[in-house]
Amino acid sequence: EPGEIAARLGEHAFVREAVVVARQNRAGDRHLIAYVVCAPEAQSDGLDGPELANTLRAHLSARLPDYMVPSAFMRLAELPLTVNGKLDRKALPAPADDAYARSAYEAPQGAVETALAEIWAELLGLERVGRHDNFFELGGHSLLAVQVSSRLSQAVGVELPLSTLFARPVLGDLAARIVEVLSRSGPQHLPAIVAVSRHEPLELSFAQQRLWFLAQLGEG
């Protein structure tokens, strides 16, 4: 229950008031979002954005099951109220990217990380995703994980089991695993590469086919 989650948040010394609601993100998925008014202790510690989200997420993760932990923690100066003194849910702002628990941003490196970051950003409704970000801490769940696997299969022709994403939820780690799979795949597993001008299969070395694969992933 959102009320129980908010009550647990209120147990943290940094939180003076809290409310938890379910709302749709830019991708159309519904996520739990926590809105908090911080106590002076949080101000003095200089916690803001991802640091505050990481702190509060860790607090709730130790007390509640994963499905009850909000995806984002939005800091407000005060909770918006109606003229009757009740919470004005329509006035609650959409969470900014820095309201999610995430590591300090570092841009994706290479074609695989870049393409994977674009897939995650689209599915999670975020502006950007860094190479150290955790899929599930950004609001990912099992249904979105299925979509990630499907997108990767379409892009590179390699099917990764869902267990791989659960075992390697950090973007850089998952991308490294994808590269490992590609490097171990023989030419017989690769789809035909067709010359656009002649519509005939091209005879390329395995190394050239791997480079073509990475280029396709970057464009997918």
Image (spheres, rainbow, N blue to C red):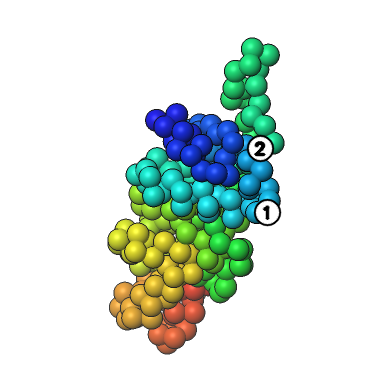
Distance of mark 2 from mark 1, alpha carbons? 15 Å
Give the quadrant of residue 129: bottom right
Q: Nearer the viewer, residue 28 or 9?
A: 9
Residue drawn at 55 percent across, 50 percent down: 53
What residue is rendered at 32% in x and 58% in y?
Answer: 162
Name the residue carrying label 2.
Answer: 76
In the foreground, 26 or 152: 26
Asked if labels 1 and 2 touch by Cβ distance under 8 angstroms, the answer is no
Residue 203 spot, x, y in % from top left: 42, 84
Which of the 4 image quarters holds residue 111? bottom right
Give the quadrant of residue 187.
Answer: bottom left
Secondary structure under the numbered disc 1 in the rendered image: loop
Q: Nearer the viewer, residue 44 or 59?
A: 44
Q: Amino acid at mark 1?
A: Gly
Q: Is residue 16 visible?
A: yes
Q: Position of residue 23 (x, y in %)?
A: 52, 33
Q: Residues within 10 Å of mark 1 (few under 14, many from 20)?
A: few
**Residue 25 against residue 169 in the figure, above or below:** above
Q: Which residue is mark 1?
A: 46
Q: Residue at x 39, y 72 (%)?
A: 177
Residue 76: x percent and y percent? Answer: 66, 37
Q: Amino acid at mark 2?
A: Leu
